[in-house]
Image (cartoon, helix red, strand yellow):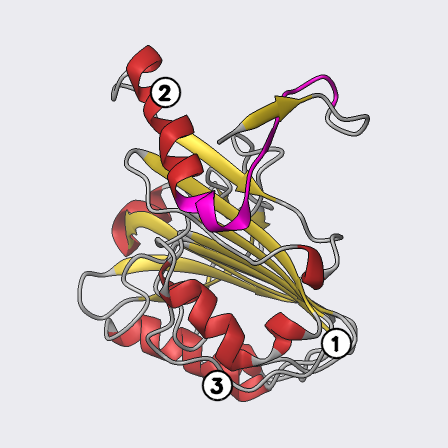
């Protein structure tokens, strides 16, 4: 049985009330009702931003529904900071389109085959601790990290594996901001090429996949004289490293096409 009511925090949007044991059938029933009204011609987006609710009040759950894209956001502290519980949740859930994680407690590394790495966009905040290496096994399109510190070798590994064509086939962009300084020498160690300093390089920016509120917006612009070329198809990626940022933007251009855009 499903009961609908308006609560003070729901902004006049009806809130469904149901027994915990009925949750799967409730989600399916509501979604089937939407399908009856709107059909299969549109994409449905389900959002779960309930980070603030104490974990004893709810069990994390994402239903298996057709024609649905899922945006999942959560604080990882306590129950879900245990990598076993975290992986159990995601392994039993559909692959999410966007995942936003705020890691507040030290975590063990994720399974390399974790569904987290299959999301189109993953945005991770670990400002207090040195969290797991989310870059190495990422399979999606965009990943953003805000962290205290990150190993220099991780950035070098990412660029070199992309250049070889052995990993990051779907990658569009990497956006990392650190609290501590990024160690120097990354550009030299990944063998970047440089556009003449007197010329203006093109700016890389694509539709962002790292958040929900501005889902039709674009990514942080990357305008850099440094770039690398992928061995397998001659595709180009712009690379920018500053004191606290590492930016990597993949172009849908060969090196020849890319250089034609240089002013």
**Which residue, given by chain and number where applicable, does mark 2 sit on?**
33
Q: Secondary structure at mark 2?
A: helix
* Mark 3 or 1, nearer chain start: 1
On the picture, is 194 further left or further right than 254? right
Start and end of the magenta stretch?
11-24
Point out residue 17 in the picture as x, y percentages from the top left corner: 60, 34
Q: CA distance from mark 1 to mark 2?
A: 46 Å
Camera-nearest label, 3 or 2:
2
Identify the disc placed on residue 189.
Answer: 3
Q: Nearer the viewer, residue 13 or 244?
A: 13
Q: Do the residues under discs 3 and 1 have CB atoms within 8 angstroms?
A: no
Residue 15 among those drawn in magenta: yes
Identify the disc placed on residue 247.
Answer: none
Point out residue 146 in the picture as x, y percentages from the top left corner: 68, 65
Residue occupying the far front of the picture: 1
* Mark 1 or 2, nearer chain start: 2
Residue ID at (33%, 71%): 162
Q: Is residue 222 visible?
A: yes
Would you place residue 17 above or below residue 111 in this image? above
**Which residue, given by chain and number where applicable, does mark 1 sit on?**
148
Q: Nearer the viewer, residue 11 or 105?
A: 11
Residue ID at (63%, 45%): 49
Residue 198 among those drawn in magenta: no
Q: Secondary structure at mark 3?
A: helix
Q: Do the residues under discs 3 and 2 have CB atoms within 8 angstroms?
A: no
Q: Is residue 191 visible?
A: no
Would you place residue 233 above or below residue 15 in this image? below
């Amino acid at each position: 049985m499903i009961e609908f009511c308006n609560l003070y925090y729901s902004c006049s949007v009806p809130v469904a009330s149901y027994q915990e044991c009925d949750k799967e059938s409730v989600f399916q029933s509501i979604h089937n009702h939407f399908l009856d009204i709107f059909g299969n011609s549109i994409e449905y987006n389900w959002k779960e931003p309930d980070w603030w609710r104490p974990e004893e009040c709810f069990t994390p759950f994402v239903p298996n529904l057709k024609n649905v894209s899922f945006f999942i956001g959560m604080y990882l502290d306590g129950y879900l900071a245990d990598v076993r519980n975290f992986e159990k949740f995601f392994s039993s859930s559909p692959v999410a389109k966007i995942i936003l994680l705020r890691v507040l407690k030290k975590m063990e590394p994720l399974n390399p085959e974790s569904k987290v790495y299959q999301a189109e966009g993953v945005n991770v905040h670990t400002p207090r601790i040195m969290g797991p290496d989310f870059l190495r096994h990422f399979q999606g399109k965009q990943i953003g990290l805000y962290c205290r510190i990150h190993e220099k070798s991780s950035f070098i590994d990412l660029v070199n594996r992309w250049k070889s064509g052995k990993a990051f086939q779907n990658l569009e962009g990497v956006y990392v901001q650190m609290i501590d300084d990024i160690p120097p020498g990354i550009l030299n160690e990944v063998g970047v090429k440089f556009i003449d300093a007197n010329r203006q390089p093109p700016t890389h920016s694509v539709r962002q996949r790292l958040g929900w509120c501005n889902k039709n917006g674009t990514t942080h612009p990357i305008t850099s004289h440094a770039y690398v070329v992928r061995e397998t198809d001659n595709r180009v990626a712009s690379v920018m490293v500053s004191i606290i940022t590492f930016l990597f933007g993949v172009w849908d251009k060969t090196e020849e096409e890319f250089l034609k855009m240089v002013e």
